[in-house]
Image (cartoon, helix red, strand yellow):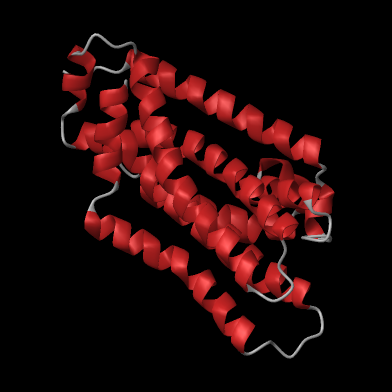
Amino acid sequence: MLTIYKLSLTQMLRPKRLLILLFIASVPVALSVVAAIFPPDTEDLVSFRDDFLMGPIVISAVLPIITVVLATASLGHEIEDQTMTYLFLKPVSRWGIILPKFLATITVAGVVVIGSGVLTTVIVPEGSVTTSAAAAVGLAVGVLAYTSIFTWAGLMTSHALALGLVYVFVWEAAIVGFLQGVRWLSIRHYTEATIHGFDDIQFAGDAATLSLPQALSAAGIVVVLFVALTIRRLTRMDVA
C-alpha cells in the first residue's frame, strides 16, 4: 500500500497540475494581503473575511475545485491509462488500493486547501489562532467529504470532473444557497458549520442552521457511505 501511496503522490504532484492548483489556492491569500495593506471601508472586518474571502472564495471555490480535480483523477486516470489492471494483479485487496489513493488525495488537497484557508485568516485583519484553527478543521472536513464522493465518481464515469464542477457551482453555489432546507446535502455547509462550531464568531448567520455535531455526523456518513460504494464498485469492475 505504501508503494501505491507514493506512486499516487507522484501522479498528483505533476508540475503543471500543481502550479495550477497553487495558483487557485493563492488567490484568497493574495486578497488577504491586499486587505491587510489597504483595509476595506468597513468596520466589520469579520464579515469581510467570512462573506468575501472565506465563504465565496476559499470554501465555495478553492476547496471544491482543488479536491474534485485531484479526487476524480486518483482512480479515473488509472482507468483511462489502462493501468488499473496492473494494480489488480498486485496481491493487494481492493480496499488496499483505494485507501492509499484516498490518503494521497487528502494529503495533497489538504495541504493546499488548508494552507490557503489558514494563511487567509492569519493575514487578514482581526485574524486569530482560534480563527485559523477552526478554519483548518472545517476545511479538513470538506476535503474528506469531497474526496470520498468524487473518488467514487471517478470510477463511475469518465465525465466525473465535469459532473463535479456542476455539483459545486450549480447545486452548492446556487440551489442550496436559496433552499435552506437542503443544506443537509451540502458539503459547503458542513464545512461552514464545523468552522462556526469551533469559533462561533465565524459564519454566525447561515452556518448556524447546522450544529457542530450535526455537521460532523453528516460529513461522517458521507465519507463512510462513499468509501464503501467505491470499494464495492472497484470489487465488481472488470478492467481486463
The image quadrant where one finds the N terminus is: top left
Q: Is 8 located above or below residue 229 in the figure?
A: below
Task: Evaluate whether residue 226 shows in this view.
Answer: yes
View extreme (front): residue: 129
Residue 50 percent location from the top left of the image: 71, 67
Front residue of this view, candidates 173 and 224:
224
Residue at 37% x, 46% y: name it: 70
Task: Evaluate whether residue 164 shows in this view.
Answer: no
Residue at 31% x, 24% y: name it: 2
240 relative position to 62: left or right: left
209 relative position to 236: left or right: right
Residue at 54% x, 53% y: name it: 114
Q: Is 19 located above or below residue 90 in the figure?
A: below
Residue 157 percent location from the top left of the image: 34, 36
How many numbered marks have been drawn onto this rendered protein structure? 0
Residue at 77% x, 60% y: name it: 203
Residue 212 percent location from the top left of the image: 79, 41
Front residue of this view, candidates 205 and 109:
109
Q: Image quadrant of residue 177?
A: bottom right
The image quadrant where one finds the C terminus is: top left
Residue 176 percent location from the top left of the image: 68, 54
